[in-house]
Amino acid sequence: MTTDSWKKHKSIGILSVFVVLAALLILSGCTTQPTGTPTATPTATTVPTTTFPINEVDMAVYNETANNTTVEIPVGSGGLIVRLAENPSTGYSWNATVTSGLTIVDDAYEAGVASQGMVGAPGTHYWILSGTAAGQQKFSAIYMRPWENVTGSEDTFVLNVLVE
Protein backbone atom coordinates (compact mmCIF):
# COMPACT_ATOMS: atom_id res chain seq x y z
CA MET A 1 0.00 0.00 0.00
CA THR A 2 1.39 3.36 -0.95
CA THR A 3 1.56 6.33 1.34
CA ASP A 4 -1.11 8.22 -0.64
CA SER A 5 -3.41 5.20 -0.59
CA TRP A 6 -2.92 4.77 3.17
CA LYS A 7 -3.68 8.46 3.82
CA LYS A 8 -6.82 8.17 1.68
CA HIS A 9 -8.07 5.13 3.67
CA LYS A 10 -7.31 6.89 6.94
CA SER A 11 -9.23 10.01 5.82
CA ILE A 12 -12.20 7.89 4.74
CA GLY A 13 -12.18 6.08 8.12
CA ILE A 14 -12.13 9.33 10.07
CA LEU A 15 -14.86 10.79 7.85
CA SER A 16 -16.99 7.66 8.38
CA VAL A 17 -16.70 8.00 12.15
CA PHE A 18 -17.83 11.63 11.99
CA VAL A 19 -20.78 10.74 9.72
CA VAL A 20 -21.93 8.01 12.15
CA LEU A 21 -21.60 10.35 15.15
CA ALA A 22 -23.52 13.11 13.34
CA ALA A 23 -26.30 10.66 12.43
CA LEU A 24 -26.58 9.48 16.03
CA LEU A 25 -26.73 13.06 17.26
CA ILE A 26 -29.49 13.94 14.80
CA LEU A 27 -31.50 10.80 15.54
CA SER A 28 -31.30 11.31 19.28
CA GLY A 29 -33.34 14.48 18.87
CA CYS A 30 -36.14 12.60 17.10
CA THR A 31 -38.21 11.65 20.08
CA THR A 32 -41.86 12.30 20.73
CA GLN A 33 -43.08 14.62 23.42
CA PRO A 34 -45.38 13.11 26.07
CA THR A 35 -49.02 14.02 25.67
CA GLY A 36 -51.29 15.20 28.45
CA THR A 37 -50.47 16.53 31.86
CA PRO A 38 -48.29 14.32 34.01
CA THR A 39 -49.87 13.26 37.28
CA ALA A 40 -47.95 13.01 40.49
CA THR A 41 -48.25 9.81 42.45
CA PRO A 42 -48.49 10.68 46.13
CA THR A 43 -46.32 8.66 48.45
CA ALA A 44 -46.87 8.19 52.12
CA THR A 45 -43.90 9.19 54.21
CA THR A 46 -43.63 7.56 57.58
CA VAL A 47 -41.30 8.78 60.26
CA PRO A 48 -39.74 5.96 62.23
CA THR A 49 -40.38 6.32 65.91
CA THR A 50 -39.12 4.45 68.88
CA THR A 51 -41.76 3.24 71.24
CA PHE A 52 -40.10 3.49 74.59
CA PRO A 53 -41.28 0.90 77.08
CA ILE A 54 -42.15 3.60 79.60
CA ASN A 55 -45.19 1.70 80.87
CA GLU A 56 -43.25 -1.52 81.32
CA VAL A 57 -40.93 -0.22 84.02
CA ASP A 58 -41.68 0.60 87.62
CA MET A 59 -39.43 3.63 88.12
CA ALA A 60 -39.87 7.24 89.09
CA VAL A 61 -40.04 9.60 86.10
CA TYR A 62 -38.50 13.09 86.21
CA ASN A 63 -38.96 15.90 83.68
CA GLU A 64 -38.05 19.58 83.32
CA THR A 65 -39.81 20.41 86.59
CA ALA A 66 -37.17 18.39 88.47
CA ASN A 67 -34.30 20.53 87.16
CA ASN A 68 -31.64 21.15 89.85
CA THR A 69 -33.31 18.87 92.40
CA THR A 70 -31.93 15.87 94.28
CA VAL A 71 -33.53 12.42 94.18
CA GLU A 72 -32.62 9.07 95.73
CA ILE A 73 -32.29 5.63 94.13
CA PRO A 74 -30.91 2.31 95.40
CA VAL A 75 -27.61 0.85 94.19
CA GLY A 76 -28.08 -1.84 91.55
CA SER A 77 -31.71 -2.77 91.04
CA GLY A 78 -34.21 -0.06 90.27
CA GLY A 79 -33.35 3.31 88.90
CA LEU A 80 -35.13 6.27 87.41
CA ILE A 81 -36.29 7.74 84.13
CA VAL A 82 -35.52 11.25 82.87
CA ARG A 83 -37.80 12.54 80.13
CA LEU A 84 -37.18 15.86 78.38
CA ALA A 85 -38.93 17.57 75.46
CA GLU A 86 -36.83 17.49 72.28
CA ASN A 87 -37.30 18.49 68.63
CA PRO A 88 -34.42 17.12 66.53
CA SER A 89 -36.06 18.36 63.30
CA THR A 90 -34.77 21.82 64.31
CA GLY A 91 -31.25 20.46 64.77
CA TYR A 92 -31.45 20.67 68.55
CA SER A 93 -30.95 17.62 70.75
CA TRP A 94 -30.04 16.80 74.32
CA ASN A 95 -26.43 15.81 75.01
CA ALA A 96 -26.55 13.92 78.30
CA THR A 97 -23.70 12.88 80.59
CA VAL A 98 -23.58 11.06 83.92
CA THR A 99 -21.00 10.77 86.67
CA SER A 100 -19.20 7.47 87.20
CA GLY A 101 -21.71 6.10 89.75
CA LEU A 102 -24.62 6.26 87.29
CA THR A 103 -25.17 4.26 84.12
CA ILE A 104 -27.45 5.13 81.22
CA VAL A 105 -29.14 1.77 80.72
CA ASP A 106 -31.15 2.92 77.71
CA ASP A 107 -32.14 6.09 75.90
CA ALA A 108 -34.62 6.71 73.12
CA TYR A 109 -36.49 9.44 71.32
CA GLU A 110 -40.24 9.21 70.86
CA ALA A 111 -41.56 11.49 68.13
CA GLY A 112 -44.72 13.45 68.66
CA VAL A 113 -47.54 13.57 66.13
CA ALA A 114 -46.94 16.24 63.49
CA SER A 115 -49.79 18.48 62.38
CA GLN A 116 -50.73 18.25 58.72
CA GLY A 117 -48.21 20.15 56.63
CA MET A 118 -45.73 20.34 59.49
CA VAL A 119 -42.28 19.02 58.64
CA GLY A 120 -41.21 18.11 62.15
CA ALA A 121 -42.86 17.83 65.50
CA PRO A 122 -41.50 17.94 69.01
CA GLY A 123 -41.24 14.70 70.90
CA THR A 124 -39.67 13.36 74.07
CA HIS A 125 -36.22 11.98 74.82
CA TYR A 126 -36.08 9.33 77.55
CA TRP A 127 -33.13 7.99 79.55
CA ILE A 128 -33.26 5.06 81.96
CA LEU A 129 -30.61 5.45 84.67
CA SER A 130 -29.28 2.95 87.16
CA GLY A 131 -27.13 3.60 90.21
CA THR A 132 -23.88 1.59 90.12
CA ALA A 133 -21.96 3.17 93.00
CA ALA A 134 -23.16 4.69 96.26
CA GLY A 135 -22.75 8.41 96.73
CA GLN A 136 -23.76 11.74 95.22
CA GLN A 137 -24.08 11.38 91.43
CA LYS A 138 -25.28 13.67 88.66
CA PHE A 139 -27.21 13.47 85.39
CA SER A 140 -26.51 16.55 83.24
CA ALA A 141 -27.86 17.46 79.82
CA ILE A 142 -27.46 20.43 77.49
CA TYR A 143 -29.93 21.22 74.67
CA MET A 144 -28.06 22.46 71.63
CA ARG A 145 -27.10 21.88 68.02
CA PRO A 146 -24.11 19.51 68.12
CA TRP A 147 -22.17 21.44 65.46
CA GLU A 148 -22.39 24.77 67.29
CA ASN A 149 -20.12 25.94 70.08
CA VAL A 150 -21.46 26.21 73.62
CA THR A 151 -22.41 29.84 74.32
CA GLY A 152 -23.75 29.58 77.86
CA SER A 153 -27.30 30.49 76.84
CA GLU A 154 -28.35 26.89 76.09
CA ASP A 155 -31.07 25.14 78.07
CA THR A 156 -29.60 22.75 80.62
CA PHE A 157 -31.01 20.10 82.90
CA VAL A 158 -29.31 18.76 86.03
CA LEU A 159 -30.62 16.01 88.27
CA ASN A 160 -28.60 15.28 91.40
CA VAL A 161 -28.94 11.61 92.30
CA LEU A 162 -28.11 10.20 95.71
CA VAL A 163 -27.36 6.52 95.17
CA GLU A 164 -27.76 4.51 98.40
Image (cartoon, rainbow, N blue to C red):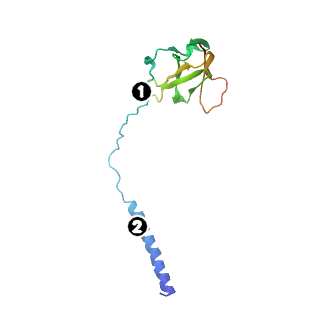
Where 14 falls versus 5 (above or below)?
above
Foreground residue among 38 and 129: 129
Q: SS at mark 2? A: helix
- Residue 28 coordinates in the image, percent (x, y): 39, 60
- Residue 42 coordinates in the image, percent (x, y): 36, 36
Rendered residue at 55%/30% (across/down): 91
115 sits left or right of 75 in the view: left
- Tell me the quarter of the picture where residue 48 sits: top left
- Residue 35 coordinates in the image, percent (x, y): 32, 49
| Residue 23 image label | 2
Rendered residue at 45%/19% (across/down): 54
- Residue 19 coordinates in the image, percent (x, y): 43, 71
The answer for how far apart the CA atoms under marks 2 and 1 are is 53 Å
Residue flagged by tag 2: what amino acid is it?
Answer: Ala
Rendered residue at 34%/50% (across/down): 34
37 sits left or right of 147 in the view: left
Q: SS at mark 1? A: loop
| Other residues around mark 2 within 10 Å, as few (<14) / some (14–19) / many (≥20) | few
Q: Are marks 2 and 1 in contact (CB under 8 Å)?
A: no
| Other residues around mark 1 within 10 Å, as few (<14) / some (14–19) / many (≥20) | few
Foreground residue among 99 and 148: 99
- Tell me the quarter of the picture where residue 151 sits: top right
The residue that disc 1 covers is: 116
Rendered residue at 46%/81% (across/down): 9
Foreground residue among 164 and 55: 164
Foreground residue among 122 and 118: 122
Furthest residue toward bottom: 2
Residue flagged by tag 1: what amino acid is it?
Answer: Gln
Residue mark closest to the camera, 2 vs 1: 1
| Residue 156 image label | none
Query: What quarter of the picture does the C terminus occupy?
Result: top right
Q: Pick whichever of labels 2 and 1 is earlier in the sequence.
A: 2
